[in-house]
Image: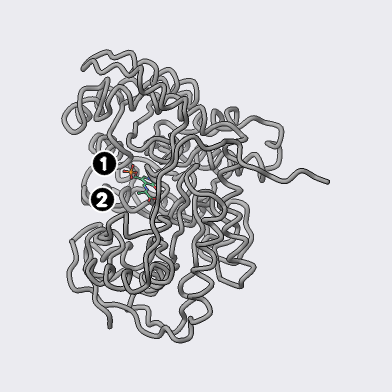
């Protein structure tokens, strides 16, 4: 008998979670103004809002925390992290920040001017927010295949080189500060970018003399998919692949809350000393002195260990197999999910799931709310609410996909929880034809509105 797959860890500490009744959940979500971000965590049974900062640290990470050096300047924890980052990514310079968007804030303050454009593959919302905040424009150059959720394509995060070329053909060079490649591409469904594509982007950037920056929050998951799917990489180690990936970038922004497997933290990795110097000024202003930048010494220690754990094959196999386990359960029930399954999450195609709900009544949000009321499972809308209004026309932007993302925290839930999530969603699926109306906005912020938006039933 072939031995079945099993997790590459056992559990040393547990955290109790509590089930609730449907009546409780109906009341709680009404009080939360139909915004899942407004719920208290104890009102949620299985929390798939995000895989960001929600993972379980290992015993090695916890023990490294005890050795944290909290010196303001020159802490040994800083040097430990610097060594880990340069060993794993190859970037000789780095700046710690308190999380990923802070890295964006610091680096974009250094590089972006008003009126510029930043091409990339489906920029994440904070990335786009930090570009638009500087009166610049993010141009999405993701391949068209990414928006067909049923299409089997190994690298749906890839940049479309013709679209990228078009940006260079239609804008003067001084208007393009850099290209940003998000690995894996969260917005297109946790989909990876191939090394071949990264190389092509690099070549195009070299031709025009612009920088390539990686938004590398899930770089290790991206490397796992390269090993499994890209010809020529099956025998290469994850760390070798990671090295090759980063050799194609000039800098990286990192949310360590994902593939750093820590609860808080981020950094910028850089190759050029001069850029490091310029960014240091903003880092000191916004984050903290350059040897801590918003992180405590113990957190830098935990991250230094986490980066190694996240780039172990067995860890990645455990992690990504669990995501696929949930994906398969939903797929087998006939539920339309993004295919192939993403690295950190399963994305449910809400337009196909709830075809009767009008687009302007926020289809994906409607589905996310139904799932919460059904089972106390919290996912997140990646659709029209998250897409914000057009900064010029102030009209709602309708993205090509309305998705509900079920993001799986790292090393946190068991496959029994995945069964529970699948059953909850299947129950909603069985009554989908009774769901005909959605929600309207009562209150919203001018940017990144999904965090605080208040809704009411139509
Ligand atoms: N880039 C990507 C691709 C992300 O997914 C995120 C965060 C960030 C940057 C910003 O990092 O949260 O540390 O400031 N994504 C989280 C998510 C919030 O739920 O997908 P941060």
Q: Are marks 1 and 2 in contact (CB under 8 Å)?
A: yes
Q: Secondary structure at mark 2?
A: loop
Query: Left or right: where does residue 102 sit relative to residue 418?
Result: left
Query: Left or right: where does residue 395 sit relative to residue 84?
Result: left
Residue furthest toward the right?
Answer: 1
Q: Secondary structure at mark 1?
A: loop
- Residue 393 seen in this snapshot: no
Q: Residue at x 31, y 26 (%)?
A: 95
Residue labelled 1 has its Cβ within 8 Å of some atom of ligand 1: no
Q: Earlier in the sequence, mark 1 or mark 2?
A: 1
Relative image position of residue 198 (x, y in whole percent): 53, 41
Query: Left or right: where does residue 401 sit relative to residue 196?
Result: left
Residue under label 2, please give it.
Answer: 136
Quadrant housing the C terminus: bottom left
Residue under label 1, please give it.
Answer: 112
Relative image position of residue 2 (x, y in whole percent): 80, 45
Q: Quadrant of residue 36?
A: bottom left
Of residues 418 and 169, the one nearer the viewer is: 418
Q: Residue at x 28, y 61 (%)?
A: 450
Relative image position of residue 34 (x, y in whole percent): 27, 70
C-alpha span from label 1 to label 2: 7 Å
Q: Residues within 10 Å of mark 1 (few under 14, many from 20)?
A: many
Q: Quadrant of residue 276?
A: top left
Q: Residues within 10 Å of mark 2 (few under 14, many from 20)?
A: many
- Residue 299 seen in this snapshot: yes
| Depicted 346 relative to depicted 256: above or below | below
């Amino acid at each position: 008998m072939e031995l079945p797959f099993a997790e590459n860890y056992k559990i040393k500490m547990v955290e109790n979670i509590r089930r609730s009744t449907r009546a409780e959940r109906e009341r709680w979500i009404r009080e939360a103004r139909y915004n899942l971000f407004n719920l208290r965590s104890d009102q949620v049974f299985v929390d798939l809002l995000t895989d960001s900062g929600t993972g379980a640290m290992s015993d090695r990470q916890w023990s490294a925390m005890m050795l944290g050096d909290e010196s303001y300047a020159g802490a040994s924890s800083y040097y430990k992290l610097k060594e880990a980052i340069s060993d794993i990514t190859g970037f000789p310079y780095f700046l710690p920040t308190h999380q990923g968007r802070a890295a964006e804030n610091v680096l974009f303050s250094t590089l972006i001017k008003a009126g510029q454009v930043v091409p990339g593959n489906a920029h994440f919302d904070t990335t786009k927010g930090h570009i638009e905040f500087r009166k610049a424009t993010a141009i999405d150059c993701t391949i068209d295949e990414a928006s067909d959720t049923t299409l089997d394509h190994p690298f749906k995060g890839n940049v479309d080189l013709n679209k990228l070329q078009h940006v260079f053909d239609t804008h003067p060079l001084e208007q393009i500060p850099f290209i940003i490649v998000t690995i894996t591409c969260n917005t297109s469904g946790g989909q990876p970018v191939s090394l071949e594509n990264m190389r092509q982007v690099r070549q195009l950037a070299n031709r025009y003399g612009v920088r390539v920056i990686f938004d590398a929050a899930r770089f290790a998951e991206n490397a796992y998919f390269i090993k499994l799917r890209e010809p020529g990489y099956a025998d290469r180690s994850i760390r070798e692949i990671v090295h090759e990936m980063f050799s194609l970038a000039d800098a990286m922004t990192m949310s360590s809350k994902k593939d750093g497997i820590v609860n808080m933290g981020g950094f910028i990795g850089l190759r050029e000393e001069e850029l490091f110097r310029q960014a240091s000024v903003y880092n000191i202003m916004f984050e903290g002195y350059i040897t801590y930048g918003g992180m405590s010494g113990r957190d830098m220690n935990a991250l230094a260990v986490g980066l190694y754990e996240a780039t172990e094959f067995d860890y990645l196999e455990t992690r990504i197999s669990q995501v696929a386990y949930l994906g398969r359960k939903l797929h087998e029930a006939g539920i339309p999910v993004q295919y192939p399954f993403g690295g950190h999450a399963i994305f449910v195609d809400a337009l196909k799931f709830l075809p009767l709900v009008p687009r302007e009544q926020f289809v994906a949000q409607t589905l996310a709310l139904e799932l919460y009321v059904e089972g106390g499972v919290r996912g997140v809308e990646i659709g029209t609410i998250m897409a914000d209004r057009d900064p010029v026309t102030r009209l709602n932007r309708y993205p090509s996909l309305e998705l509900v993302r079920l993001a799986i925290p790292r090393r946190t839930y068991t496959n029994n929880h995945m069964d529970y999530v699948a059953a909850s969603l299947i129950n909603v699926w069985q009554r989908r034809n009774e769901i005909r109306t959605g929600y309207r906005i009562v209150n919203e912020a001018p940017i990144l509105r999904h965090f605080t938006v208040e809704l009411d039933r139509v």
